[in-house]
Image: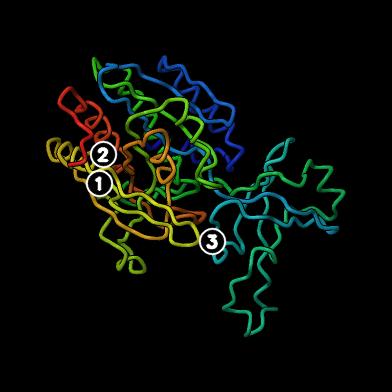
Amino acid sequence: MRALVEELMLIPGLAGHEGRVAAAIRAHLDRMGLDGQTDRLGNLIATVEGDPALPSVMVFAHMDQLGFVVRKVEADGLLRLERVGGVPERALAAQAVLVCTPRGDLPAVIGNKSHHATGPEEKYRVVPYQELAADAGFASRAEAEAAGVRIGDPVVYLPRVLDLAGGRIAGTALDDRAGCAVLLALADRLTLRQRGPTVHLVWSVQEEFNLRGVLPAVRALAPDIAFQIDLVLACDTPDMAHRGEVALGAGPAMSLYSFHGRGTLNGLIPHPALVRHLEAVAEGAGIPLQRSAHTGALTETAYVQLEGEGIACLDLGFPMRYSHSALEVAEVADLEALVDLLDAALAAIDEDFTLERT
């Protein structure tokens, strides 16, 4: 799991530019003997056929990451950037980034005004991203263009992975390459199963852009149930202690309530039959299952649940600190336990399973 997560974290894949990530995942599917198909929007889909009498299940995780696109190339060679997704402005200055051009990837740094020239009124100001520029070393617009830089080129945090104590890792795009790795590990398990429901595995696109990239896949597959794999906000640091009880190393978590609350009146209250199902499976298998309820975040299930005649949805995930920053933190053991939980939950969907709400 550790090696798989690292492999995926180090591949740049801005929302709308997920091709390299999809190619790496498809290579793993090929080794498993699973046929991965890509739809027109870029969603990667692999299906493990099962008993047609049982509810069909879609398990999905998003491949893309947040970042920027080049908005303007200045005459002096500096690059102005436009945000893609919820990039925190207070974490931008002095960050290393990667500019992904058709001719290759170019490292750059988002400039931070020299401390020796920073006045007292500037020291505690968060600089809006429109005022920031990425410095790739070019002395002119002509140099930047000769290197292949164009308006619209994707830019991501410089991909890196750090080994921390206690089996924890830090790095770029744990959201949601860790979820992609969990889904691949689950796929490997499903190739060995003897029976169970049909399971559609989907690595989705553009989640960080508009949360709707998965919808063409949902409409094509028309599942009865959807499990989404993504981060769950860890609340085990002083700045997050008031938000909940989810902690790194305490196992996977499920969301009992999510709501965006900032201009997007959408979220998910999960299907009660799925909540009961996961609780029973986790207890029976001895897998710790944490509970989360929060405002301020949103996942694709907010839209998936409304497709067709309605899809029973549940958000499952791994605890993660420092979301949307250049160095997010998670624990590998939580990812492994999440694979175990998903595997057991799918195996327990049998003839007695029901989606009755009460």
Q: What residue is disc 1 on? A: 251
Helix, strand or loop under label 2: helix
Place residue 284 in its image quadrant: top left
Looking at the rendering, which quadrant does residue 348 occupy?
Answer: top left
Distance Cα–Cα, label 1 vs label 3: 27 Å
Task: Look at the numbered discs 1 and 2 and tell me whether their residues touch, using CB distance below 8 Å.
Answer: yes
| Image quarter in which the N terminus is found | top left
Residue 279 x %, y %: 18, 42
**In the rendering, at what x and y percent does residue 330 appear?**
37, 49
Furthest-front residue in this view: 309
Callout 2 crowding tier (Cα within 10 Å): few <14, some 14–19, many ≥20: many
Q: Position of residue 9 (x, y in %)?
A: 49, 41
* Mark with earlier residue (1, 3): 3
Disc number at residue 337?
2
The local crowd at label 1, few if under 14, some if 14 to 19, many if 20 or more residues have their Cα within 10 Å, is many
Q: CA distance from mark 1 to mark 2?
A: 6 Å
**On residue 88, which mark appears?**
3
Residue 124: quarter of image: bottom right
